[in-house]
Amino acid sequence: MSDTAEQVFLPRLAAHIARVAPSVDIESRQLSTPQLAKAMAMGSVDLALGYFNFENDGLYQQKLFDAQYACIARRDHPKIPAKLTLSQFKSLGHVVTGFDNTAHASAVDAFLRAPNVNARIAMKVGHFLSIGPIVAESDLIATIPRSLALNFERSHNVTTHSPPLRLPSYAVSQYWHARFNKEAGLLWLRSVIKELFS
């Protein structure tokens, strides 16, 4: 699970588990997408939650919800006095995550490098949680999951903007390996996650 997915899923999941199954333990691990698929096939990871581009046919997927991207910039950004324009979006430096533990990195990278955008990627970082403080203290901007943008807006000196170009929504899902499809504990956990987040 990425650091972004941890912020989305774990607070509500932890509260629910504490109420209904206090002896159940949850461990979140951050692995690259290929490592995650392999770990699920081996049974060392039960579920993946988030937005992934798995190439492994042995995995099941259950969509939980659709999510959107948003842009963030520091509140007092000298070049963005109000709404983020396409011209500003193209001319400003962007900070992105380069870690391949979700499909966000490749989706945002492809969007920024598209011929009609051709934005400058000024910085790549290893984790989404680094992006908020970097944007808050610099003139860089970022395109990130909207849920994370809103969290950063509450905790850092950033403001959320709608992207000046339409970005497609993405499906946030839970994934598991076919070998463990009927395992009782995982059936229960998958039903809990579906109930909490669909």
Image: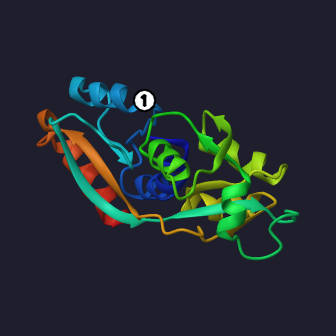
Q: Which amino acid does label 1 sit on?
A: Ser
Q: Which x, y percent locates residue 99?
A: 52, 33
Q: Which x, y percent locates residue 159?
A: 74, 67
Judge by depth and name the residue closer to the eye, 177 or 99. 99
Judge by depth and name the residue closer to the eye, 195 or 19. 195
Quadrant of the image containing the N terminus: top left
- The part of the image, by quadrant, that contains residue 31 is top left
**Who's the residue at 47% across and 32% down the image?**
30
Residue found at the very far bottom of the displayed protein:
82
The residue that mark 1 highlights is 32
Quadrant of the image containing the C terminus: bottom left
Position above or below: 127 against 15: above
Mark 1 Cα-neighbour bin, 10 Å: few <14, some 14–19, many ≥20? some
Would residue 164 be found to the left or right of residue 139 on screen? left
- The part of the image, by quadrant, that contains residue 170 is bottom left
**Who's the residue at 80% across and 68% down the image?**
80
**Who's the residue at 63% across and 62% down the image?**
71
Position above or below: 87 against 141: below
Residue found at the very far front of the displayed protein:
115
